[in-house]
Image (cartoon, rainbow, N blue to C red):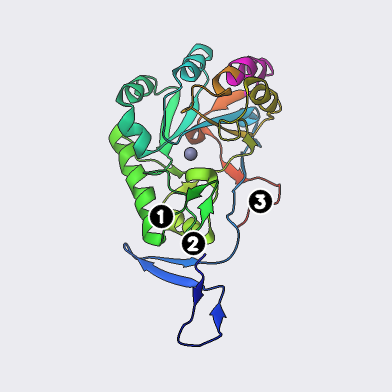
Amino acid sequence: MKSVTAGALPGLRIAVLTLALLVPGGVRAASDGAPPFEPHQRLDVASPAHAQDVALTLDACGGAYDQALIATLLRLRVPATLFVTKRWLDRHPAAVRELRAHPELFELENHGSQHVPAVIGRRLYGMQGAPDGAGVEREITGGAQAVLQASGRRPDWYRGAGAAYDRASLQIVAQLGYRVAGFSLNADQGATLGAAAVARRLRQAKPGEIVIAHMNRPASGTASGLAAALPDLLGRGLTFVRLSQAAGVLPARDGKQTP
Ligand SMILES: [Zn+2]
């Protein structure tokens, strides 16, 4: 949100200014005053073949590599969709090699270039958002190029830092040809929860759930929580799929599906 005082018109303060920006690439972006929107989505589980599908999505924002978490997924043969930033990819070439050695389990998707939120001119969870539409576009395309370079595959999905967006940024994501990846179950609250809390949340997963957690904070409770709860979910007959394997991804019916 931009707020300006119109000096040429004394006494007139324009508190809400709708900005229309023409950014490079021809993407037209408009900033409005609405709060950032957090898309909630679920998998399509209507067909019998996909009735037990659940997706585990793991973000690597920056920071470290949670090797114990990945080892658990390898041991349990649980596939996951990994949202990685360029920043994280650049720092962890050995981790990228390990993940690429298991294409049957892991798929890399785009979490942006420098983990800058797709909220123009405002803050999100303490992070400064992109300054303008061009900044949003740089974040998306920079991340996409890094994923392509690291995995040999163009990403289909984009999940911005903080997983919330303003309306203009959602338009930019769509116009660049990507889909916004939401979620339905927040398992680790930004890797801030202890193992017991992560496991408790994860055990609530139902068919169609898209779980979000983090794979960049080994000191958090995320890996231990997943290790504790994943066998229970598998025992209940839930089938983990990558987003590309899902029958479809639908807006969740919790009132947060439309911007
Ligand atoms: Zn992140």
Task: Name above or below for residue 11 compared with residue 189.
Answer: below
Q: Quadrant of residue 45?
A: top right
Residue 103 is situated, as x and y percent measured from the top left of the image, at: 39, 24
Residue type, label 1: Val
Please identify the dominant SS of the magenta region. Answer: helix
In the rendering, which numbered label is found on residue 26? none
Contact, CB < 8 Å: mark 1 with mark 3? no
Find numbered disc 3 in the image and state the secondary structure of the residue it sits on.
loop
The residue tagged 1 is 136
Residue type, label 2: Ala
Find numbered disc 2 in the image and state the secondary structure of the residue it sits on.
helix
70 vs 91, left or right, is: right
The residue tagged 2 is 168
Question: Magenta residues?
Answer: 225-238
Residue type, label 3: Lys
Contact, CB < 8 Å: mark 3 with mark 2? no
